[in-house]
Image (tube, coloured by chain):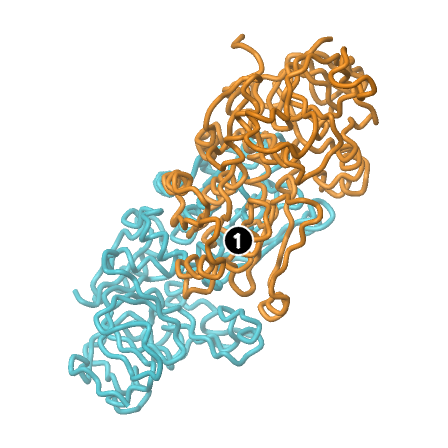
Chain colours: A cyan, B orange
Amino acid sequence: MATVDKTIPDHFRGILCRGIKNYTVEEEIAARDTLFEGRPKEELLPGEVLIRVTRCGICAGDAKCWSGAPMFWGDEIRKPYVETPVIPGHEFVGEVIAIGNKEEKSQVQVGDQVTAEQIVACGKCLYCRKGLRWLCAPHDIFGFHRCVHGGMGQYMRFPQNSIIYNIPKRVSPSEAVYVEPLSCGVHGAHRGRIELGDTVVVSGCGPIGLGMVAAAKLAGPGRLIALDCMDSRLDIARECGADIVLNPLKSNVVKDIQELTDGYGCDVYLEATGNPKSVEQGLYMIRKNGRFVEFSVFKDKTSVDWTIIGDTKELDIMGAHCSGDNGYKVAIDMILRRQIPVERIVTHELSLDNIIQGIQYVNEGKDSIKVAVDPTK
Amino acid sequence: MKVKAAVLQEMGRPTPYAKSKPIIIEELELAPPHDDEVLVKLLYAGLCHSDLSVINASRPRPTPMALGHEAVGRIQQAGKNVDNVQVGDIVSCVFVPSCGTCDSCRTGRPATCTTGAKANGAGLLLCGQSHLSRTTQVNKPNDSKMIHHLLGVAAFSTYSVMNKNSVVKIDPSIPPQYAAVFGCAVITGVGAVVNTAKIEFGASVAIVGLGGVGFCALLGALAAGASNIIVVDLEQSKLDLAKKLGASHGVLSTKDISLDNLIQSVKQLTQQGRGVDYAFEMAGSGPTLKVAYGITRPGGTTVTAGLPHPETQFSVSQVTITAEERTLKGSYLGSCVPTRDIPRYVQLFKEGRLPVDKLISGIITLDQINEGFDQLDQGKVIRLLLKLHDDEE
């Protein structure tokens, strides 16, 4: 057992999710009850890591969870996913305070700036055994299950089977907080199997879509087109590498893409809006044998003539979830090489007191792109 | 019509070629094109190792043979069945005259066209004949008058007749000296990376052998988003150019280096020393393939576009193929569909994403061709271009 650095207090400040629309700032969260699951905090297991959190992003998933979305709280078909009370947040970055002793040399050291994969894979289920750890059945994602409290608080504990990534300190916390969403964008773009010279369309320029634009750019598309209904987001998409930006409210984008491609349609469509209209639009603008990637969480059901998938176009439809196998590695590399303007994407950094305001920014999606909390404020 | 062409008299003459003169510039009679053929006025042609391999007998072909297979030209005449190009078009030549009807062509793999391969092997055009003949006896009285065509193109000539499937129309706005390299180096090199291997952005890559094809593989890896690119060659100047173009690391090899030491030096530059996701062997020798295989990580893919002598065998540790679940893939013509990929890569060049102009080491004329092949043989140049005509509109 390791002795814990005395900078971990018994109580710390953080957000607690207690129920629907019930996220509160707590001044005295008991470390033992939360981070250590009832163990004395001195008993750090080998490979466990204690983190002082510097930033944590608010995901659209967090905002929908606060609102009461059935995918989190359950309905007639689905069991509840979130366990309360829990400290939310899975897009976190922080500094290592203490590490439980390990037989082998540890990958990280005290003082390092780190993040961990949002999912802590069990290693035993069907998906983990196939090497698809981001689809792990128990699906312990930080901030939703009580064995893995999240980053919207001053401290976190990474369990033994976390996958931890070092983020060099020349990346600031305000930039590093974007690593997780970017890792998802990377995975989505990988699923599209983009080939050099392809015509690629990304629909939806939120944090995930913009990450997909920047990641897709690396694959050398002949033309990279971004779609969004907000011109301000299209400007940022251009900065992320889009060659052409189009607003579906202002032009017939299906026709535009068909004209650009001699009537064939685009090779790849990456859908990141969660809007049924964008799904239909994509199915109409993609060419036969094209690759359609779906990443989003939807509010409303989508309805299309399913004939288009098979008989009309023989499409490859690929879902994408979380970060895949190497999303984090590529994302950190992209930020280090300045291949994406992170400062234009992380638009708000709020203190914990303003969590509800932050969630509202995300739900409205108008004046913000990526909103983060700063537990040090 | 009369043409001036670089004709290989016999294979296997010794270096330096400036002295042994295996190639003689001959005046030949070129028969007019048949209905499926075109007459091409050649503008620039590249000196490629595949031409050199015929000269040094490592890739034996029937002689005497008019060499050259990588070129850009202008269509002067077109047979009545020619539907893909017309007179005046600027075209890139392709070294497999894909027939369009065999199983390979019909399944989207024109590089392995069986009819084309047969014609190429015989040194004839797809029609089964040669269109080149000597007007006078060169050596002895019973020497053949017929001259073979290299790969259906025979581009080291002022004019050549080719099957219509040996040419792809390209954008006339790019300078012809840059257009010349697309027919071989570019599609072979870039294609190995983006078609044969289909690397994902973020992958780690190694390229062994920085000739014209190896450099194009580098450009392909850069364009397709490889994150760690290691290049290996015998010439420091080539490694330096590769790093200027964006390669992450250059590893200098020597003719008598221990292969194991070389493999270790490369692996140290990879994540956890495991090796690269994709290694490309672009030099065509047993040792380079051994190195490329050795620097590939377990589960990774080794791609070879090298063309050694037909009797060359290669050896790798057989157990590693199984125990490390390796993949070894051959890449011919960059697994390209030339009619699709040549225009695609020309467009990327126009946009500055495939700077193939950086590969041109110099321009020579027909009378300097033996010297040109000496330079290529010594590994000193990437791509030398032959200029066949004076500048004109």
Say which of B50 and A246 sits in front. B50
Tag 1: amino acid: Ala
Please name the residue shown 81% across and 17% down the image.
Answer: B141
Residue A329 location, quadrant: bottom left
- Determine whether the residue tagged by mark 1 lies in a helix, strand or loop: strand
Q: Is residue B82 visible?
A: yes
Q: Is residue B180 left or right of residue A98?
A: right
Residue A14 visible in rendering? no
Q: Which residue is mark 1?
A: B279
In the foreground, B2 or B9: B9
The structure residue drawn at horizontal position 81% and vertical position 39%, both measured from the top left corner, is B102
Where is residue B63? Give x, y as percent: 74, 28
Q: Quadrant of the N terminus of chain B?
A: top right
Q: Does residue A31 sit above or below B380 in this rendering?
A: below
* Image quarter hosting the C terminus of chain B: top right
Indicate the position of residue B42 as horizontal and vertical percent values: 62, 17
Closer to us: A299 or A121: A121
On screen, residue B45 above or below B61: above
Q: Position of residue A356 (x, y in %)?
A: 28, 64
| x, y percent for residue B306 | 61, 45
Q: Chain of mark 1?
A: B
| Residue located at (23% from left, 81% from top) | A29
